[in-house]
Image (spheres, helix red, strand yellow):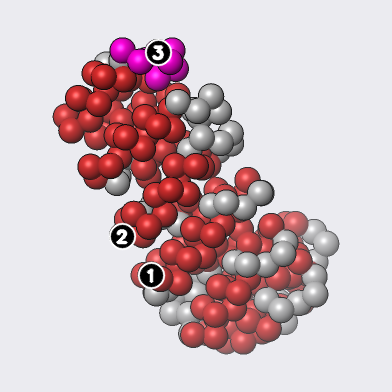
Amino acid sequence: PDLAPRLGDPSDRIRAEAVRALGAIGAPALPPLVDACSSEEARIRSAAAEALGFSAAPPPDAVRAILDRARDGAAEVRAAALRSLTRWGDLVPEADARAAMTENLRHEDESVRLAAVDGFIDRPAMLPPAADDLEALATQEGDAAPLAAFLLGRLGAEAPSRLLRALKDDRSPVEPIAEALARIGRPAVPALNEAAASDSPRVRRGAVLALG
């Protein structure tokens, strides 16, 4: 389609409009978008990866292109690829999606970490193998930490211990962790009662918030 060259437009607005338009076109737009994922320009790779994510039935070469871009050297490209994997959901094999998301939970760029953690929200089966990385993310500053805490709260029996361990870290967000513990409900109460007597003020505060 003639819109493909607009993926490299210097205007953010025009690139965004090209992404939406190409995504709406569907199958005829896929080959040039897959090719654009290999562009030398990061902004073209990023826009192409974003546009591919709007395909309702991505062919195998599109999925492979996005999985490759999830390991791109440019953070903006990685984040776009991860968002596309999230949009595709179960259309991407779980093992491939889990590997891409888990790897990027540890990325240095906040936008990449946020895109990665988003990918777990609608695919709970991917959570247990990523538990250690999610716990580590919950102790970091930034917008991804509260989401990581939310996901840790969905881990079943091990959720309270992981959340309370994360709460001990001075960098972790107290309120989101307390909210995640509160959502667990009755199974978390014994651990919370014990945590309410902790030597750590932040652990006591989080426990009291969750119990309240």
Q: Quadrant of residue 4?
A: bottom right
Locate residue 38 relative to residue 185 in the image: left or right: right
Cα–Cα gap, marks 2 and 1: 8 Å
Residue identified by numbered label 3: 199
> What residue is at 53 percent from the left and 69 percent from the top?
53
Q: Is residue 80 above or below residue 188?
A: below
Under mark 2, the amino acid is: Ala
Residue depth check, mark 3 versus mark 1: number of the one nearer the observer: 3
Q: Depth check: 137 or 4 in front? A: 137
Q: Depth check: 153 or 66 in front? A: 153
Could you tell me which secondary element the residue under label 2 belongs to?
helix
> Residue 78, image x and y in percent?
63, 62
> What residue is at 53 percent from the left and 52 percent from the top?
105
First reached walking from the N terminus: tag 2 or tag 1: 1
Q: Contact (CB < 8 A) between labels 3 and 1?
A: no
Mark 1 surroundings: few (<14), some (14-19) or many (≥20) residues within 10 A: some
Q: Which residues are magenta?
A: 197-204
Q: In the drawing, what numbered circle is on residue 94?
A: 1
Residue 199 counted in the magenta span: yes
> What residue is at 49 percent from the left and 58 percent from the top?
102
First reached walking from the N terminus: tag 2 or tag 3: 2
Q: Contact (CB < 8 A) between labels 2 and 1?
A: yes
Residue identified by numbered label 2: 125
Mark 3 surroundings: few (<14), some (14-19) or many (≥20) residues within 10 A: few
